[in-house]
Structure formats: C-alpha cells, structure tokens
Image (cartoon, rainbow, N blue to C red):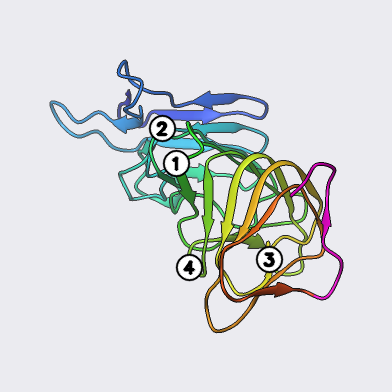
Amino acid sequence: DLYLGTNSSFEVKNGAIFNFGFAADNTTALNIIRVSSPTLRSGQTFSAISGSTLKLTSPLGITSSGTYTGNVQIGAAATNRTLDAGATYHYIGKANQVSGNGLPNAITGKVIVEMDTDALTFNASTNKTLNTGGTLEIRKGIVVDDSTNSFGDAASNTANLTMSGGRYKISKTGTQPAFSGTYNLTAGVVEYANSQTTAETVRTKSYQNIEITGNNVGNSGGNITLNDNGT
C-alpha cells in the first residue's frame, strides 16, 4: 500500500496511467491509505484529472469521499477526493468487482472492464450515466446490468459501447443496451436476461453475438444486424 501523511496529495495528470496493482500474492489489491501510526494523519487529497487513467484492482472499486474502502482510502470531504468524469476508469479485478460509488456520473471518458477471467462479474454501484463521447468498453468478464446497478446514457446524451470480449448481461426493461451512440462490437456476447412483467427489447444496432436467456425479450421495432461470423 501507499501511505500518505498529513496534508499530502496524490494527483494523476492528463495522459498519466496509475495502476494500483496487487501485493506479492498477486491477489490482494493495493491501495492509497492514510498513515495511522503512531497517530492517524488527516488532510490528504487524491485527484484523477480529465485525461488520466486509473487501473482499479480493489473488489470495491473506487469509493466516494469519507468512505475508507476501495483503492483510494483518503479524503474525508468531496474536495479532497477528485474523480473527474473525463478520466478513464479501467477495472482489472482478480475477484468479482463493483465500480464503487466514487465512479462519477455524466462520464465523458471511458469505463473499461477487463477482469482477470471471463467468469468474474462486474457491476456498477447504483445507476451510472455516460455523456456523449463517453464509452463503456468490455474486454473480459461479465458486466451485469439490472434495474438498480447499471450503465446508460445521461439525459439527452448518446454514449458509446465497445466490446472486444466478455459478456454484457442485461436484465432491465425497455430498449437495451441503454446507449444510443456508436457501437463497435467485434467480439463478446450481449445477453438479454429480462424476465420481468415489462418487456426488454433489443436496440436497433449491429452486434457480434446475441443471446436471449430471459422470457420477456422482444424486438424494438427496427432491424437487428449481426456482424460477419456473428451468432
């Protein structure tokens, strides 16, 4: 772990990549935390500014100010823990992982999910939104989207979806995925898993692979296109 003393600061600048990494056992996530011995130190700040990248390894992701869990465990006030919507949040957990409530809304950067194996799950902590230009990118693992923990467009915005692997398992009602921007799906599976009374419908986009596992899934009314060698 990286320990910060009284009034210390840590900033990840535009273009920089900070990987929180793992301990020698290659399993335990490493974190930025407060010096606590011989006395607890305070006044630390953490900033990830627009254009920076955080590689997040904690199963709890990145949490908001005043919550001392996840990869960043400093900053008692919002002004002491800055997580910019224009940054890239790259999740690379070796266990099932959540985004953490520190992941901002109205994201204009990226959320990248690249779990250690395709069997591991990832989900947003509550419902998170992306603005026009923002992208959810799935590389490995299962992103689980439901009515209370999900990703989607911010109001009047058109965010993007990219997949080069993994699985996007969506069990929400309405037209899904909840992104209306550009789709670049070269691998992976979009799974429609809704079994609620209200239907889930497949958005009119081009997909690589689709699976229907829910019992209340339909067509949104337009054409559904599969890319070459899609299923």
Report, in whole angstroms, how far the alpha carbon at label 3 lies from the one at label 2.
28 Å
Quick one: label 3, few (<14), some, or many (20+) residues within 10 Å?
Answer: some
Q: On the rendered structure, is 9 left or right of 218?
A: left
Q: Secondary structure at mark 4?
A: loop
Work out whether mark 3 precedes mark 4 in sequence or the reverse, and give the earlier one: 4
Q: Secondary structure at mark 3?
A: strand
Q: Are marks 1 and 2 in contact (CB under 8 Å)?
A: yes
Give the amino acid type for the residue marked by disc 4 in the picture: Thr
Give the amino acid type for the residue marked by disc 2 in the picture: Lys
Give the amino acid type for the residue marked by disc 1 in the picture: Leu
Q: On the rendered structure, is 149 left or right of 28?
A: right
Residue at the disc numbered 3 = 176
Q: Nearer the viewer, mark 4 or mark 2?
A: 2
Residue 148 image label: 4
Q: Residue at image x 50%, y 54%?
A: 124
Quarter of the image where one finds residue 35 = top left
In the image, residue 35 lies in the stretch drawn in magenta? no
Q: Are marks 3 and 1 in contact (CB under 8 Å)?
A: no
Towards the viewer: 170 or 79: 170
